[in-house]
Amino acid sequence: MAELHLGQVMVYQGDPLVEGPEVVSVLRHGALLIADGKISVIGEASDLRAAHPQAQITDHGDHLLSPGFIDAHVHYPQTAIIASWGKRLIDWLNTYTFPEEMRFGDPDYATEVAGRYLDLALSNGTTSACSYCTIHPASVDAIFEAAQARGMRMLAGKTCMDRNAPEGLRDTAKTAYDQSAALLARWHGVDRLGYVITPRFSPTSSPEQLSALGALWAEHPDCLMQTHLSEQVDEIEWVKSLYPKARDYLDTYESHGLLGENALYGHAIHLTPRESARIAETGAALIHCPTSNSFIGSGLFDWPARLAEGQRIGLATDTGGGSNFSMLRTMAAAYEVGQLTHQPLHPAQLWWLATQGSARALRIGDKVGALAVGMEADFIAVNLASTPVIAQRASRANDIWEAVFPTIMMGDDRAIAGVWIAGRKVGS
Ligand code: GUN
Ligand code: ZN
C-alpha cells in the first residue's frame, strides 16, 4: 500500500551553489507519497490527502523531511580509531590507521565493524556513503554484504597499496588489479551497490600499481575511481620526491590513467592552478572533508576559488580522519571553513551539498539525494528542535533557514527523528 508522509518537505529546483539559495525551498505543509520504494508524488499535504484517501498516513508535524545524507568519502575500517589524538597525516596513518586496518585480515572483524559503521551512519541520517575499505578483499565483501542486508545504496572499493605501508598491508600491482577486478565483477551493479576503484594515494602506490588500476578503470569507465589529493603540504613534498617527473600531484594520477569525469579526489586543499584547471576541464569531483581537514591539521579548502571555477563538489566526513559521523556536524565545519575563506555558505547550500551535491559527485544524483518524483525513497525526518538550546534559537526564527541553521550548527544524531531506506523505516 502507498504511504503518505506529511511534514515540511525540502525541495531542490536547481544547484544553489551556482544559481543561489533561492532554488531550494521547503513546502511548509508538504507531503511525499511513497510506493514501491520510490517517491511517486510530492506536493501540498491537503492535495495529496484528498487525491490518495487510501494511503497510510504518517504525520511528522513540523519535522523536516529531507533526502538522506550522503557521505562522499569515508573509511569505514577507521570507525574504531575515530578521535585519535595528536598526529598529522603521515604519522596518523602510521600510528593509528595502518595498525587498525591490519586487523581487517580477519573477516569476522571486518563484518563486525562494517555493521557497526552502517548503523552509526544510519543513526546520523546518512543513507548512502562512498567508502574506502582495506587491502583485504574480505573487507569489501563485509561492507557490501552489510549494506545489502540493510537495502542501502553503497559505494566502496578495495584500498590498494604496494609500498610505504607495513608488511601485511601491501598488495602488488598485479594482485591489486586482479582482486579489484574480481570484486568489481562480484559487486558492481548488484542491488544498490557500486564498486569504486581505489588507489589509496600516490605515496602508497608504485607507478606500476597506478598504471594497473588506470588500465582497470579504462576497462570499466562507468565505475568511479577514488583517491586522495593534496591534503597536506608535507605529503605533497613526499609525492614530488617519489614521482620526480610528475608536473604536480594530480599528474601522478593523470599520467597513469587516473583522471576522468568519474574521478573523486578527497581533500584537494593545496591545488596548483594547473591542477584545478584540469579537474574543472575533465569534470572530476572534489570531495570536501572539513572536520578531517581541521582535525588532522591539513588546511582550508579554498571555497571562493573552487566555486569560481565551477567545480563539482561533494561533502564528506572522512571518518576516522574526520572527527564525527554526522553530516550535520560536517555542514557546520564546512560553514566555518567558508567563513575563514570569506565565502559564507547559505544553509540551503550546505544542506544541498550534504545530499544532492554529494550524490552528483558520486554520479547517483538521478537516484538519491533529492525528494522528487521517481527518486528512490531514502529520506529522513529531522527534528529542528532536538535539544533545548536548538529549540530556543529555532523558536525565534523568522524564516525556514533561520529555523534550520541552528540544527546545522549544533545538531547531531538526536536531531534524526526517523530514517527510511527505499521507503522502509530503519529499525522497524
Ligand atoms: N591519505 C591517505 N590515506 C588517508 C586516510 O586514510 N585518511 C586521510 N584523511 N588521508 C589519507
Ligand atoms: Zn580519506
Image (spheres, rainbow, N blue to C red):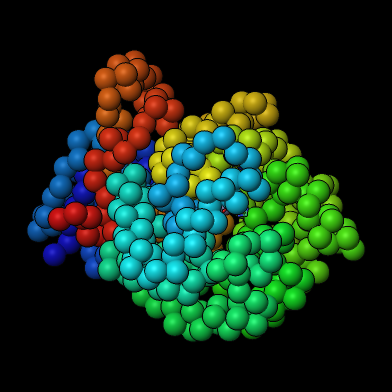
Where does the image place residue 145, in percent across and percent down from the top left? 34, 71
Q: Nearer the viewer, residue 29 or 60?
A: 60
Q: Position of residue 299 (x, y in %)?
A: 67, 36
Residue 172: % across, % down: 65, 77
Say left or right for 10 vs 283: left
Q: Residue at coordinates 69% horizontally, 53% vertically from top-left?
A: 229
Q: Quadrant of the N terminus?
A: bottom left
In the displayed orientation, state which residue is furthest to the right: 245
Which residue is outermost to the front? 167
Query: From the image, which quarter does the C terminus lie in?
Result: bottom left
Could you tell me which residue is drawn at 33 percent across and 49 percent down? 120
Of 196 and 312, which appears nearest the observer? 196
Q: Residue 181, position in %: x, y?
A: 55, 82
Residue 198 sits in which quadrant? Answer: bottom right
**Total marks drawn?**
0
Whether residue 204 is visible to the viewer of this picture, yes or no, is yes
Quadrant in the picture for residue 292? top right
Image position of 3 with respect to 334: above or below: below
Residue 72, visible in the rendered structure: no
Residue in the picture at 31% in, 38% down:
413
State whether residue 201 is above or below residue 300.
Answer: below
Q: Who's the residue at 63% across and 40% down the image?
A: 88
- Viewer-nearest residue: 402 or 92: 92
Horizontal side of residue 10 vs 56, given as left or right: right
